[in-house]
Image (cartoon, rainbow, N blue to C red):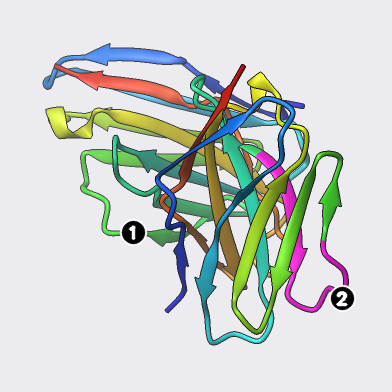
Amino acid sequence: ETGVTQTPRHLVMGMTNKKSLKCEQHLGHNAMYWYKQSAKKPLELMFVYNFKEQTENNSVPSRFSPECPNSSHLFLHLHTLQPEDSALYLCASSLGLAGVKETQYFGPGTRLLVL
Amino acid sequence: AQKITQTQPGMFVQEKEAVTLDCTYDTSDPSYGLFWYKQPSSGEMIFLIYQGSYDQQNATEGRYSLNFQKARKSANLVISASQLGDSAMYFCAMTSGQNFVFGPGTRLSVLP
């Protein structure tokens, strides 16, 4: 079951471009997350939103700008990226934030290549 | 601070055999949840199984079972009757409250 969708699935952009990643969840969840997965590095949590409010920003550079207009949609706006930002960007959602049974469900990811 | 350790970067298993993927964790919270995810080459992280710290029985989901040893702080994933489609990266993760931590992963290759 894929209740979390992400578009685009693949993206190639130059360092001066501006692009946006989109995530949509159809699970009725209230919390949404952006993760970065680089080759040979652990999954890195970037941003957390709960009921549209940002609750966590893990020291992410300002060239990444998240937006959460409602509990079902999450965007990641990209501008003036660097080649080291090339990675798989995963979106996830969970019913809530608190509690030890909060399973996160992931989208298919966007593979980003910055040239 | 929470930490997940997966000591096996890569594992091989023969088709139809069982395989155990190791996971140890560290937390000072008495209440926590443990998860396993599968990530095929397509990239999507697929939730497999959950174990709560207060659950008395080991979790099972089809061919997946979690060997939970609380005193040893281990939560190993057992896959029975391996299939070629089980070839993927497997991540152990933990949450206690609002922190969700992933391990570095184990790459499983199922041989025909």
Q: Which residue is mark 1?
A: A58
Which amino acid, by three-letter code, is at mark 2?
A: Gln
Q: Nearer the viewer, residue A108 or B51?
A: B51
Element under label 1?
A: loop
Which amino acid, by three-letter code, is at mark 1?
A: Asn
Relative vertical location of residue B25 with respect to residue A74 in this rendering, above or below: below
Q: Chain of mark 1?
A: A
Q: In the rendered image, which quarter contains the N terminus of chain A?
A: top right
Question: Residue A84 location, x and y as percent?
Answer: 16, 34
Q: Nearer the viewer, residue A43 or A107?
A: A43
Relative vertical location of residue A10 with respect to residue A87 in this rendering, above or below: above
Q: Chain of mark 2?
A: B
How far apart are the two marked residues, 2 and 1, measured between alpha carbons?
Answer: 35 Å
Relative vertical location of residue A71 with respect to residue B26 in this rendering, above or below: above
Question: Residue A112 location, x and y as percent?
Answer: 31, 22
- In which image quadrant can residue A12 be found? top left
Q: In the rendered image, which quarter contains the C terminus of chain A?
A: top left
Q: Is residue B13 magenta?
A: no
Question: Residue A83 location, x and y as percent?
Answer: 13, 27
Viewed as shown, does residue B36 lie left or right of A8?
Answer: right
- In which image quadrant can residue A35 be found? top left
Magenta residues? B47-58
Q: Which residue is mark 2?
A: B56
Viewed as shown, does residue A15 lie left or right of A54?
Answer: left
Viewed as shown, does residue A72 lie left or right of A38?
Answer: right
